[in-house]
Amino acid sequence: MMNAIEAQQAAARVMSRCDALAEISETAGELTRVYLSPEHMRANTRVGEWMEAAGMRVWQDSVGNICGRYEAAEAGAPAILLGSHLDTVRNAGRYDGMLGVLAAIETVHYLHQNQQRLPLAIEIIGFADEEGARFGITLLGSRGITGSWPDSWRDQPDSNNITVAQAMRDVGLDADRISQATRQVREIVAYLEVHIEQGPCLEQAGLALGVVTAINGARRLNCCFSGEAGHAGTVPMLHRKDALAAAAEWMVAIEQRTLQHPHMVATVGALSCSPGAVNVIPGEVNLTLDIRGPADRPLADLLAELLSLAEEIAQRRGIRFCADEFYHIAATRCDERLQMQLAQAVEQVQGRCISLPSGAGHDAIALAERWPVGMLFVRCDRGISHHPAESVQAADVALAIQACVQVVNDIAEYPHPLQDCLN
């Protein structure tokens, strides 16, 4: 078990390195680092140097992930995979993604300093593109590992009309060799990711760490209420077909109904009103619905309930409602055994543990298609993420590294139940 002083020293390095990576940005005074940019390559180089210093063999794969391997007691053994992403949104915080990669390096550093080799190897990946800020497609790095890149991604353009394939050529990669990044199922036993919570639950519970149960599934819809525009002064209230009033009623109902379903969230994030004049009754309202939850069936049931309610509101008001789903991603359940091992480690370092779902997406979504995945959340200030105010405490990071070291040892000593999951 890593002791408290060792953990504090490791956390101090992580915090310092997060600061160093935050300086690698395409925009002065902000943190923006997107896939296949010069800054992405510079960050890979820096992280590769830290991996090497921790005793790892390092390489950059064919989709731009930076990878390191700490060999097992017997060469060629399967690996426990650790990591997160190194790309950012625009004007980002410095811990989302980076914290998980750097905490993983400290886990290996501890083993290397103590001359420990485990029955399983440890590999770390700094994934190339989880956020999708440049090309509008996500999980490019992790889907490179799983071999699930759609062919169409090669031709996806960025805002400057540079395609993924062209951007790969610009940094010395070859889109014809994307498949070389694919890892065989037998090579990896499990994937673990340390990540900031991106929410307020741990802070409200007064805890540094929590174990993720699932990564929420999500549905996104474009919705429309169509009524009848009319003169704001001459149409009596009882004769109106006000699309905005219907939309407003539905929005309040969405909030009220979703509050009855723990761990689910629903958001109307965009709304436009036509004709949009102060003296005209709104004839049409277009709005979006984003709904998320940790289990697919309850999520589908809640969505059906909300859409049925919208139809009821529209019918009662003598107007029309329609909805079109444009995004659908299934919920990703974290492996039960990994949850148990993570919870035991968290209880050991902080006394008790809570479990919670993740409302945001992660590279674990892609990796769960092939391997058991587990995630450890670290408290972040006010739950703020994707923002320069993103902040974590070094003491919390120290506990996360201690827990990660413990879990890696547990998995390495008892890998067979996890390996059975792959058969």
Image (spheres, rainbow, N blue to C red):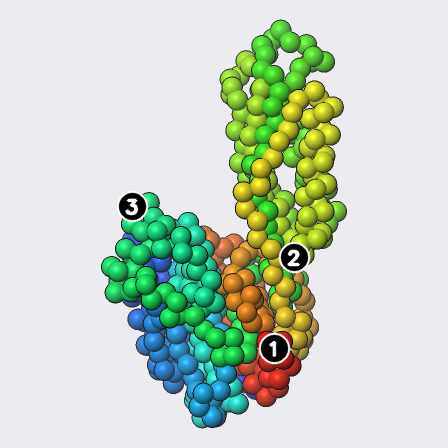
For residue 358, the mark is none
Number of other residues with Cα within 10 Å of mark 1, as a class: few under 14, some 14 to 19, many 20 or more = few
Real-space Cα separation, disc 2 to disc 3, in angstroms: 36 Å
Rendering quarter of residue 101 = bottom left
- Tag 2 secondary structure: loop
Q: Do we see residue 5 in this rendering?
A: no
Query: Which residue in the structure is indicated by mark 1?
Result: 423
Looking at the image, residue 48 lies above or below residue 120: above
Mark 1 and 3 residues: CB-CB less than 8 Å, in contact?
A: no
State the residue at coordinates (61%, 77%): 423
Mark 2 and 1 residues: CB-CB less than 8 Å, in contact?
A: no
Query: Which residue in the structure is indicated by mark 3?
Result: 160
- The residue closer to the viewer here, 343 or 395, is 343
State the residue at coordinates (43%, 70%): 182
Pointer 2 or 1: first along the chain? 2
Residue 374 at what x, y percent from top left? 58, 70
Q: Amino acid at mark 3?
A: Asn
Q: Amino acid at mark 2?
A: Pro
Q: Amino acid at mark 1?
A: Asn
Residue 333 at what x, y percent from top left? 63, 64
Number of other residues with Cα within 10 Å of mark 3, as a class: few under 14, some 14 to 19, many 20 or more = few
Real-space Cα separation, disc 1 to disc 3, in angstroms: 45 Å
Query: Which residue in the structure is indicated by mark 2?
Result: 294
Residue 315 at what x, y percent from top left? 72, 25
Real-space Cα separation, disc 2 to disc 1, in angstroms: 26 Å
Residue 378 is left or right of residue 86, and the answer is: right
